[in-house]
Structure formats: C-alpha cells, structure tokens
C-alpha cells in the first residue's frame, strides 16, 4: 500500500514538473490604446506610451510579427473604410503621434507581442 502511494505521488510530481516547464512566453493578454512614440523597423517594434500618462515618453515596446493583423481605418464624408495591411506595410502608414489599439500578449519582460493593431 505504501509503495503504491509513493509511486502515485511520484507520478503526480513528475506530471506537475513536466507541465511547469512548458510555460508559454506570454503571461497576460493585453488590449489597450496607446500613442506611438518611436518606430524601430529594424527590430520590428513600435515604442508606445499610454495616452493618459506621459504620452510623449516611451513606456513599452509592441512587437510586430508576420502573423500580426494590421487594420488601418479611413474616414471621409461620413463613410468608414477599414483596410487590411500586411505587417511590413505598417512602417510607411504609421507615424509618431498616431493613436493605435493593440491586442496581444505581454511577455515576461513586459513587452507586448501584437496579435492585431488598429489605427
């Protein structure tokens, strides 16, 4: 009986260790509105600041991946048109001072990997 109990406890401990080592890089989902402070195309990242706190000072990096969905909204004469962009097109369409909405995951270092960006 004791041998079976010990074996079960070891199996449970091994299962817990195996699942703990497979932790993902993203620990928290993020959705927020930011102001663009810096564009770093060479590292595929956008420097952002929260609009309500020091909007001119970079507070975080948003990383743009090949899988990132990018949507640019155009408004004219009461009409709204959403245009899907390729992630590499964001660098010519986005400018410092623009406001963006980001949905993605926050990594261990606090950076954000964007799943989608709207502006």
Image (tube, helix red, strand yellow):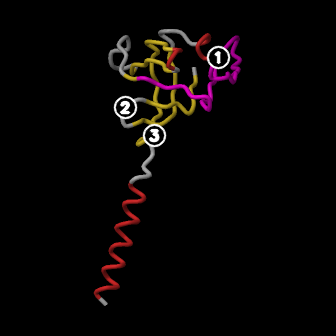
The span from disc 3 to disc 1 (Cα, nearest Å) is 25 Å
Q: Which mark is residue 29?
A: 3
Residue at 57% of width from left, 28% of height from top? 65
Marks 3, 1: nearer the viewer: 1
Mark 1, secondary structure of its residue: helix
Q: Is residue 99 above or below residue 3?
A: above
The reply to whether callout 1 and callout 2 are in contact (CB within 8 Å) is no
The span from disc 1 to disc 2 (Cα, nearest Å) is 25 Å
**Mark 3 / mark 1, whichever is N-terminal:** 3
Camera-side residue of 117 and 46: 46
> In the rendered image, which residue does mark 2 sit on?
110
> In the rendered image, which residue does mark 1 sit on?
89
Tell me if mark 1 has few (under 14), some (14-19) or many (20+) residues whose alpha carbon lies within 10 angstroms of its own: few
**Mark 3 / mark 2, whichever is N-terminal:** 3
- Please report the bounds of the magenta region as a residue range: 61-89
Residue at 64% of width from left, 16% of height from top? 89
């Amino acid at each position: 009986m004791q041998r079976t109990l010990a074996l079960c406890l070891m199996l449970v401990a091994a299962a817990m260790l195996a699942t703990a080592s497979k932790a993902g890089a993203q620990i928290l989902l993020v959705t927020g509105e930011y102001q663009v402070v810096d564009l770093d195309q060479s590292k595929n990242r956008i420097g952002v600041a929260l609009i309500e706190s020091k909007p001119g000072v970079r507070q975080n990096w948003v990383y743009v991946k090949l899988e990132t969905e990018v949507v640019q909204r155009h408004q004219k004469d009461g009409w709204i048109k959403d245009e899907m962009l390729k992630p590499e097109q964001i660098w010519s369409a986005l400018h410092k001072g623009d406001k963006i909405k980001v949905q993605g995951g926050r990594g261990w270092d606090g950076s954000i990997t964007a799943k989608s960006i709207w502006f």
